[in-house]
Structure formats: C-alpha cells, structure tokens
Image (cartoon, rainbow, N blue to C red):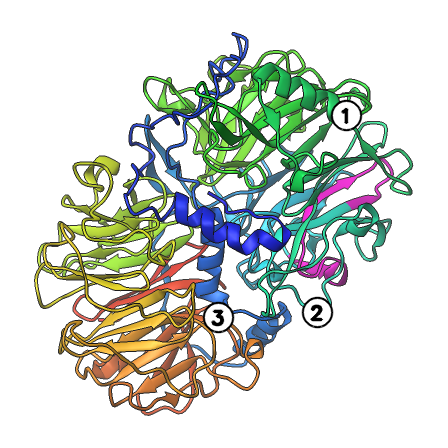
Amino acid sequence: MKSRAILSVLAALLVATLACSSLSKSPESLPSTSTPVPIEQAPTPTPTPEGGGVNEGFFDLNLSKSDQEGLEARADEIYQAMIGASGDVDRGALLEAYAELARYEHVGGEWRSAGPAPIAGVNLPQGQVPGSGRVNGFAIDPRDSQIVYAAASVGGIWKTEDGGQTWKSLTDGQVPLVYGGIVMDPQNPDTLYALLGEFDGQVSSTYGFLANGLMRSHDAGATWELIGADVFNAASVTALVFDGEGTLYASSGQTQLFQAPDDQPEFGIFQSADGGDSWERLASCSDFGVCQPQDLFPGSSVTAYLGGFMDLDISGDGTLYASLCNVECYGTHFLRSQDGGASWEELDLTAAIDQWTTENDVEIQYVGDDPSIPYLDGLEIAASQSDPGILLAGGGIYWKGQDENGRDVDGFWSWAIRSADAGDTWEWLPEAGDYCTGEGSSPQCTYDNIVEIDPTDASLMYLGGSLSTEEDTFNWIAIIRRSADGGETWTDMTPAVDPENFLHPDAHGLAFDPNDPNALWVGSDGGVAYTADASAEAPVWEKLSLGMNTLLFIDIGLHPTDPDYIIGGLQDNANAFTTDGGQTWHGASQGDAGHSAVDPFQPNIVYSHYPPYFFSRNENGGEGGADEWFGPNGEGYVDGLDGSDNWLFYPPFVVDPVNEGVIYFASNYVYATEDRGDSWSVISDALNASEHGSVQTLALSLSDPQVLYAGTTDGTIWVTTDGGGEWTEITGGDFPQRGVTRIAVDPTDPQLAYAVFGGFELQTPGEPGHVFRTADGGQSWDDLSLNLPDAPLSAVVVDVRDPYKGVYVGGALGVWVLQDGADEWLPYGTGMPFSLVSDLELNPETGIMAAATYGRSVWVVEMP
C-alpha cells in the first residue's frame, strides 16, 4: 500500500500507515492467493446495477494484502539501496560517472544474459502467465502495424518488427533511465519521444531526479538525444500529445519528489513548435495554488515536491484537458484550455461527486477539511478524437461513512466519470466498478490507471489498472474493462475463463493499432500483451514479451553445486528460478519477493520472504505457489519475529553454510533460527542509530560463522564474534553518512571485510567514499574507493582464488574489480548493457558469478 500523507503530517502518517498495515505484530494473511477476508466494518453498500460484468457491488470490499502493497516502501528502499542517500543531487553526477567509466578498458570475461526473458509462468490465483518487467507504453507505426515500440520502465526502449514475436533493445548504450512512455510523431513515424520518469511507483518518490526530459530519435530508434532537460529536470514527463498542426504539448509532475535539486523547475504544461528543441511554459502549479515545495522532515535537507500534472490529453477539435494534483495527488483538479493553452479554466465535478456519495450512502473526504478540494487520488483523462464533446476520466476517491452499528469507517475506491459536453458537466458511471485500487487495499490509482476512448468510435471506452477478485474463487479478474455503449455497461476483458484470457495485474499502458483500433497492446508489471479482437466476449491475450530481459530483481541466490540453478526475488513477480542456466525460468510463490537463498545442506530447500517480514521456505526447489512457500497457515515462518520492528520492505537474511538450519534475519534487530525458520529468537539490541533506521545487510564469515556483520541504513556497522551474544559497533570514523548497502567477508579471514555504500559523494560533502576495508574486524577502516567514479554501489563479493583474486563491486555503473595487488578499479566483464546491478553472487565451487539487475534481469559470467 502506498503510504500517503498531507503536508506537515506527511511523515507521521507515512510511519503510522506502514506500522498498521505492513508491520502489525500479528501477521495478517499475506499472499495474494490466501483467502481474502472482507473488512467487517464497511458500510452497507448500494449495489452496482447488474450487467457491469465486473463487480456485484460497488463496495464489494476485500482488503487482504495484494501484490501491489508497499509501493512507497519499495520506492524508498530499492533506490535507496542502489542509488540512495539523503540530500540533493541531480542526474548530472551519474552522467559524469558514466563518462568516467568510458575511459577504462574492461577486464574479465563475457557477461551473458541468463534471463528471465520472460518468466515462463508467474503465479496468479487462477493459474500462470508469462512475466517480464513493467511496460508503461507503446508506439505503433501506422505504416506497418508489425512495428511496435515499448517503453519498459527501468528496462529501456524496445522495438519489434514482427508484431511482438521478437524484440530488440534500442537503449543498451544509454545510461539507466526510467521510461514512463513513448510517443510517435504522427506526421513522421520515424521520430519518437521517450518520456523520462514515472509519475508514481517504485522509482519516483525518492529518486525522481533521474528524470530530466525526453529522449528523442529521428531514425526509428537507432540513435537518441536528450531534450528538454532544463524544462523537465527532476520531474517526470507525464504526457506528450500533438495537435493537428504538429505542435507538441507536454506535462510534468511527480507524486513525491523527496530529493529535489536546487534548480528544480516548477511542474507545468509546456508547448513546443519546433519538435522539442525549445519549450514555452503554458501553465504552472502555482497558477492554481498547488504543488508548493514542502519541508518533509523538520530540520532535514529533504525537500518534497508533491503533485503536479498527472495527465494531459487533446480532443479532436484541439481542446486541451489536464489533471492537476496537489498534496501528492490527494486532491485533483480538472483543467480545460480552448485556446491552445493560453488560458485555463477549472472544471466542476460536483454533480458527479454528489451522485456517487448519494447512491452509495457515504460522504467523500476532503483535503484538510476544505470542501473546495475533494479527496480524489489522481485522475486520468481521455478525450475523444471522433466526438470532441465526449470525455472519460477515472481515478481514486476517498469516502467516509458508518457501519450498521453506527461506527465511523472510511475507505478508498476508484470511480469513472463521463462528460458529453466537453467537460461542462460530469456524471458517475456506476457499472465501471472499482478498477484501479486493488479493490480498496491501496491508493494506487496514480500508479496503474488506464483511461482510453477508441479513436474512431467515442462509444468504445476502456479502463484498466490493478484487478478485481471473484467472490467465490478469489481469482484476479477485470484488469482491463470495456464499454461498447459510452460507459453505461462494462465487460471484463480478462476473465478467469482460460489461460489465454489471463493478464498480469497492474496495467499501465494501452495502445490502439492505428490500422485496426480493435487490436490492442497492453503493458503491465508483467510485460507486453496483445489482443487482435478487443470486442470478443473473452478476448484472447497473446503474451509477447519473448526476448525482453527486463525483470526487476531485488536479489538472487546460487546453488552450492549446480551451476545451472539460480533463484531470485523480484518486484511484483514474486520468486523465479532456473534449472538450465537461464534458458527457462519458472515462477514461484506469489506477489513480491526479495532476498533469496539456497540451503547449502539440502539444496532442494530454498528461502525468500514476502515483504516486509514474512519469511518463506520452499522444500521442492522453489516449485509451487504461495501454499508451498508460506507455511501451513499461509502467514510465513514468523514465529518469534516482532512485526513492530523497523522492517525494510526487503529485509536481509543470510544462511549459515557451516551450521545446518541456522539463518539470520534482520529488522533493526537481528534474529536467528536453528530450525530453518520454524522459530526465531532475537539476538541483538536495536542496531539503528536513528529512529527509522534498519539493518540493510548481513554478512557471515565462512571461516568462523560465529562472526556476523550488520550494516544499517543510517551508515553504521556492527559485529558479533560469538554468534550474537555480544555486539560491538565498528562504524568507521570516515564513513559517509549514507546507507551501508552490502558487506562481504573474506572467505579465509573473519577479520577482513569490505563495506560498500550507496548514494553520491556530493550528497555528503566532506565525507567521500564508496568502498571501505577493515583488516582487524572493524577496529580500523581504510577508504578503498581509489579511482572508482562517484556512483552508488549495492553489492560486493570477494574471490580468493588465484586466477580471479580480488574484490568485485556492483551498482549503478555495472560491475568493477580491484584485482589483488592493483591500485585501481577496472570495469569487469563485457557484454552487459548499462543497468543498475542490485546484487552480486559468487560461487567459486561452480565458477559462476551472477549479477542481478533492477530492470535488465540476470547476467552471468563464468569464472572456472
């Protein structure tokens, strides 16, 4: 669930929301396949009229944990771990680091892609679907419908020339970027615009500074150039549209930008008459009194820019429509310009809101009790091209009411509204149902929200987002909905009828084939899907992500003796494993998954966790869904764990390779088990130096497993030499005040260890360094950064074998090595595209080193 808050209370509400939803002391039923438990305090609903084909009632409440839960926590953690620290920074620092990378010759072998591309079957309650990384949008060549471009979040821009049967990456030579969509020039299909940044999601809130403009190609994706960096610095380009004369209009915004650079431009709407070379500002947040920069945490240097322009569209007569979010999109305004953006007016949604609240016998909430700002969590807009008066919009809506016992209750749902008079009046479309919130379990309509109208027929409308749940089976359905009568009735395009109808939840983009609008492309957290017949009663969806190695891995584990076995945890695609060196990957567990490992004594047993602290175990090599991973009660192996600790969304654990059954798992405390997770006991005091600090990494000595190191998000390191009996802080005096992302211990010497840090040196002036080494168990540390470019690190391993002896680190600049006796770091291996390395694992027995990436799946180099 995305944690949200309002202005001065943002931080407090963030902590409170996470504490009550994700970190309760009594574990809730967690995997998405567990039987959902409807909330009992909900008000009695007014049923949605029959015929919608999606929900039986508008308030068909189901607040079980979904695989979408924790979006905000993911954002804070994934990028905090890989490229994070507090303080201001801009993407220029990363660009300088890449320029420095180019000056070095690579050493070592050839990295090969080990997939997944995609996972053969990600587990849904009703079955499996192939799974690749998140796809946010498409551009289809009107001259040839077989030519399609896809924007894959952190995975780059991809192109197919055979209708999705095969794909090739167009951006392997680009630095890692976040792609929110792709738009084709309608007058010149060889000109493409890739929108940088995501308005909301895993990478937006803390590290939106990686977005700074548009990537433009004039040669069908062969080459790219950055444009608009000064206009869109640290802001996502949320939409780009063309008018009939070829003029471009673009909008910018970010639900949360916690670390904005000093030169952060104000979010706005912009116009370009020269193809994007120059931009003129047409509107700003301040024109409407919203998007003011906020001091997020009193006394800190963190400035939050909250909201902005979520969407922008243009109708067939050239009228512009925009949605403007304030306070992280809690309050949303609709704007219209009938003069090309020269002036804007706010549209009135009162009638639709009154209809919604009256028919459902609840009240809408207002931002700060201000009745002029209804609590609408972002709205997407679709303006008809064939009938300029027709508009469709949808997003989240907060409500409050009373249950049958008179107790106050509140909740969050989504709604769809329609206008037949170009936005002058609006009406609620009740049969559209709740389409983008995950059935009320999380306010995520700023994350997965599709609102579209067929370009040739205004009566054909589409909504998409998360999912609905079948009442009896709990299958996930209604990820995409279609109306053939202007929104009066809706049908489920993704029913749980046949695997060909299944679709991965969290849909982000929908595109019409310009030569056949009945043919649709959909992008989701599971990759690419296509249907040739959207009007079918139960459309057949082809999953067309073959060859797209764009999965977002958090961590991987290697087999002790089998070089062909790898298991990993992924964002929104659970666990996956391969038994053939990466040729095929099999889905495992369900939802999200983080750190993963193989038992060194019984390799058929594998471990992972469902965020935040539900430790999971599988005794069949990873095969199976949630039932085979989360224990007999479906709540994970959590006996003895305290859910009120400071658990990261992806907390670390390490398996003892010497003492069978022993595993260490950490929040801000360290826990140990001697029975593979059946029971846990705490073995440390709180190791966090700050109120919200957590242990981010654990490292166990192979030569003396009584020695265990722990590194924290607040830059401290602790060690125990007696298996947790006593802990000593060994934080180096020269450490930068940035998170310790990983620690590695020399396999032959428990006193020799290496610690790596995320973030940029410019975030901690006077405290440089990314790699530190101790040879005396932490009594003293040396800065071993040497010539490493200033870029975040997230992984480290040590090899003591003579042919490969050295220290290897991974992060935003790929993999580097400091060879034994050398005085400079060198890039290691060739063939891996620029990508964010989230984990490195080395097994000297099998000769395999594997790199997990956040956006480009897994890469392997053989080191026999």
Q: Is 651 a magenta residue?
A: no
Q: Position of residue 17 (x, y in %)?
A: 46, 46
Q: Is residue 275 above or below residue 800?
A: above
| Amino acid type at mark 2 | Asp
| Amino acid type at mark 3 | Leu
Quadrant of the image occupied by residue 572: top left
Ranked by sequence position, the earlier of labels 2 and 1 is: 2
Of marks 3 and 2, the one in the foreground: 2
Ranked by sequence position, the earlier of labels 1 and 3 is: 1
Q: Is residue 185 above or below residue 230?
A: above
Residues under labels 1 and 3: Cα distance? 44 Å
Q: Is residue 709 above or below residue 495?
A: below
Residue bounds of the magenta highlight: 223-249
Looking at the rendered structure, the secondary structure element under dot 2 is loop
| Image-based side of 777 in relation to 272, left or right | left
Identify the mark at residue 262; answer none if there is no mark: 2
| Image-based side of 156 in relation to 512, left or right | left
Q: For this rendering, which residue is in front, 646 or 337?
A: 646
In this view, which residue lies farthest toward the front? 406
Quadrant of the image occupied by residue 635: top left
Looking at the rendered structure, the secondary structure element under dot 3 is loop
Ranked by sequence position, the earlier of labels 3 and 2 is: 2
CB under 8 Å between callouts 1 and 3? no
| Amino acid type at mark 1 | Gln
Q: Position of residue 28 (x, y in %)?
A: 30, 39
Q: Residue at x 59, y 70 (%)?
A: 299
Looking at the rendered structure, the secondary structure element under dot 1 is loop
Say few, some or many: other residues with alpha carbon within 10 Å of mark 2 (under 14 / 14 to 19 / 20 or more). few
| Image-based side of 847 in relation to 729, left or right | left
Q: Position of residue 695 (x, y in %)?
A: 34, 66
**Pointer 3 residue:** 813
